[in-house]
Image: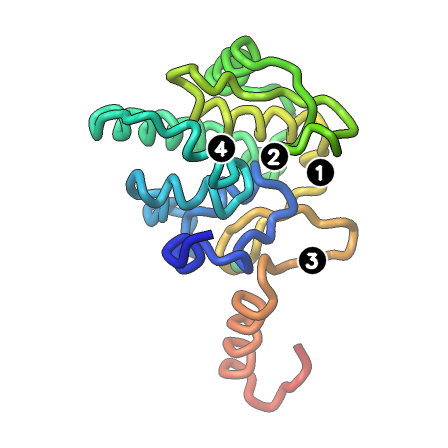
């Protein structure tokens, strides 16, 4: 992993428990405005693919076949649209919306990605594979968006949204395994909350 990738997307920030949720946590968002997205350009997107493990460096380089800057802008736009659709679905559930149905636009995008995908052995080292998974058609013009769409599809198929929590501090999402976790990162948002409470009530020391 390159130094710039580590700086932009440090491993300690991949705390969600699944790449599909980590994909939503590219936004620094204490006010839930979703205005400050670190997926701001092509290098940032490529670095995220590598840091998240969705595509290894080798697969990333295989995918990159001399596309133009205009094409990069379109791909980034498509991926941010997909991110917003998935965000709205997860956020609605976290907010207590009663119905679980996927929105038509998100459903259509996931369906298209599945239609282009093929079943293959998991992992890049075929000898060590134990099961099959949907693999992106690496020559498809939609391969970048499909790589993320397939992560979202896998997440929705294998996880209950009832397990998903949203950090009380920064609004990042994560899977809570029944431990009542409130913070995405206790050393960041948990500590910030503790400092605020101490300032508000200087005589109270308990968290
Ligand atoms: Zn947080």
Q: Position of residue 23 (x, y in %)?
A: 50, 40
Contact between labelled residues 2 and 1, with CB atoms less than 8 Å apart: yes
Q: Nearer the viewer, mark 1 or mark 4?
A: 4
**113, above or below 191, in the image:** above
**117, above or below 190, in the image:** above
Residue projecting furthest to the bottom: 203
The residues tagged by marks 3 and 1 sit, at their Cα atoms, a distance apart of: 13 Å
Which of the two discs, 1 and 4, labels the residue nearer the N terminus? 4
Q: Nearer the viewer, mark 4 or mark 3?
A: 4
The residues tagged by marks 4 and 2 sit, at their Cα atoms, a distance apart of: 33 Å
Contact between labelled residues 4 and 1, with CB atoms less than 8 Å apart: no
Which of the two discs, 4 and 3, labels the residue nearer the N terminus? 4
What SS does tag 3 mark?
Answer: loop
State the mark number for residue 193. Answer: none
**186, above or below 156, in the image:** below
Contact between labelled residues 1 and 3, with CB atoms less than 8 Å apart: no
The residues tagged by marks 4 and 3 sit, at their Cα atoms, a distance apart of: 34 Å
Identify which residue is drawn at 33% across, 49% down: 36
* Mark 3: C-beta under 8 Å from nearest atom of ligand 1: no
User: Would you name the residue on which mark 3 appears?
Assistant: 181
The residues tagged by marks 1 and 4 sit, at their Cα atoms, a distance apart of: 33 Å
Q: Is residue 123 left or right of residue 169?
A: right
Which of the two discs, 3 and 1, labels the residue nearer the N terminus? 1
State the mark number for residue 59. Answer: 4
State the mark number for residue 162. Answer: 1
User: Would you name the residue on which mark 2 appears?
Assistant: 93
């Amino acid at each position: 992993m390159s130094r710039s990738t580590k700086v932009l997307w440090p491993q300690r920030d991949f705390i969600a428990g699944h790449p599909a949720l980590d994909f939503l946590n590219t936004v620094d968002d204490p006010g839930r405005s979703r205005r400050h997205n670190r997926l701001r350009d092509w290098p940032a997107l490529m670095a995220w693919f590598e840091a998240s493990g969705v595509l290894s460096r080798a697969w990333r380089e295989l995918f990159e076949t001399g596309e133009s800057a205009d094409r990069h802008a379109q791909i980034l736009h498509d991926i941010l649209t997909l991110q917003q659709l998935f965000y709205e679905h997860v956020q609605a559930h976290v907010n207590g919306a009663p119905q679980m149905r996927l929105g038509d636009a998100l459903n259509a995008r996931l369906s298209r990605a599945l239609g282009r995908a093929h079943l293959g052995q998991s992992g890049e080292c075929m000898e060590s594979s134990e099961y099959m998974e949907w693999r992106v058609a690496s020559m498809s013009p939609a391969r970048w968006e499909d790589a993320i769409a397939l992560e979202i599809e896998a997440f929705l198929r294998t996880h209950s949204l009832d397990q998903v929590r949203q950090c009380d501090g920064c609004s990042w999402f994560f899977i809570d395994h029944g431990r009542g976790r409130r913070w995405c990162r206790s050393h960041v948002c948990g500590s910030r909350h503790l400092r605020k409470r101490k300032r508000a009530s200087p005589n109270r020391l308990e968290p």
